[in-house]
Image (tube, helix red, strand yellow):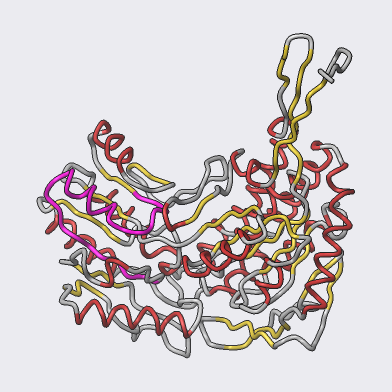
Amino acid sequence: MKAQPQASHFIDGAYVEDEAGTVIESIFPATGEVIAKLHAATPAIVEKAIASAKRAQGEWAAMSPTARGRVLKKAAEIMRERNRELSELETLDTGKPIQETIVADPTSGADSLEFFGGIIASALNGSHIPLGSDFAYTKRVPLGVVVGIGAWNYPQQIACWKAAPALAAGNAMVFKPSEVTPLGALKIAEILIEAGLPKGVFNVIQGDRDTGPLLVSHPDVAKVSLTGSVPTGRKVAGAAAGQLKHVTMELGGKSPLIVFDDADLEGAISGAMLGNFYSTGQVCSNGTRVFVHRALKERFLARLKERTEAIVLGDPQDEATQMGPLVSQAQREKVLAYIEKGKAEGATLLTGGGIPNSVSGEGFYVQPTVFADVTDDMVIAREEIFGPVMCVLDFDDEDEVIARANATEFGLAAGVFTADISRAHRVVDRLEAGTLWINTYNLCPVEIPFGGSKQSGFGRENSAAALEHYSELKTVYVGMGRCEAPY
């Protein structure tokens, strides 16, 4: 099983290698097998990528929005035609089941390219401001060279979520995928060139924790967009702020999902499972603190246990598999350590809690796990686990649960399940989060903004709002008469 790319980096429309860079091994999480070896970018590679982007950006920005949109829409079309191939690569890269990647990964990336390709002709318009005999106008202009830094849970989607609005606005991008999942972004770069993108407008370089600072601190970089953890976000935002660069931070969370006693039981359990077990729990917006009204608790837990234990674990390349491994051995060790903390703190282990016997081989599997009787002060209720571990907490009162839900440094997402639509809107208005759901969870179509508040970041991905974060306003005052001075 191999997925070796032509070279490690894609710069100025072609594959580029520099074997002086540190070796990066791409590992198939279901078996532990090395499927590709790449090299981290050397300083020379970083310079080459940024110089290429800087050169190409002016040509790209000079094209009409319609012409730029045509390229992005063509790339979306190619991605859909190759969805199976791209999904299989994403499964090898991440370990996520093919039944997920084929509907949620390349397809959502294609949606983003198509959406921004379709709206830029109108969304980038400025305004006319009458000033008596004079007037002014505004226009949206690109920032220049933008750096995108991706996470390992949705490699192809994140590459497109960042590239689509950045390129639509007329920027060029240097994208660094996670060193854990280095393969998918290279295919996106190939497809964009095939769709007609000028060489150098979208470049991909591999790297590790030493590569990011080289990109963020580079004087020719105007903006940094990061998807990652809160600690990484603090470092990147701090470095960017020192040079007054634009930033978008899409960071982690410990999001609350509140289930009131009048909620549809099966629907609420479905929402909780989607918000904890999809992608083996490796989703930043997951509702990992599930607050269940005490009157519904016993029925909720009994049915949740039954449905959780029916999840099919196995080879992610098998379309019958519903849950695959975690992305790496290190991530599995982290998740298992949190499970042990939950047991030690006195939470009730409802189901799961270890390595499954049903899956053979050397893969990085963990059982889907549910803890009940979790209290707010427990480590598993306060820290982001990023694995298939659900924490169920009890509550009695609306005001009480809102206060507890907000008692966190995070503010990425939240959800509410209730049959009382007035209460639903009342509660979401009081929850401190950037993205919220009512009677569903974790749906993120490209048409709506996605992003967090508090320590979960700032800026927005997706929707027309994202274009504002990849462009800036230029204001022009037009004097129609003679200019006079008092001296």
Stretch in magenta: 387-414
Image height of 3 relative to 253, above or below: below
Residue 349 forms part of the magenta stretch? no
The relative height of residue 344 versus residue 398 in the rendered view (above or below) is below
Task: Indicate the position of residue 299 as horizontal and vertical percent values.
Answer: 14, 56
> In the rendered view of the protein, which quadrant contains the C terminus?
top right
Q: Position of residue 69 (x, y in %)?
A: 77, 41
Can residue 1 be seen here? The reply is no
In the drawing, does residue 54 fall left or right of residue 454?
A: right
Q: Which residue is depicted at the point 21% across and 67% down?
A: 377
- Depth check, front residue: 57 or 80: 57
Q: Residue at x 46, y 77 (%)?
A: 325
Q: Position of residue 352 (x, y in %)?
A: 27, 76
Viewer-side residue, 325 vs 467: 467
Magenta includes 393? yes
- Please tell me in which quadrant of the rendered image residue 357 appears: bottom left
> In front: 174, or 36?
174
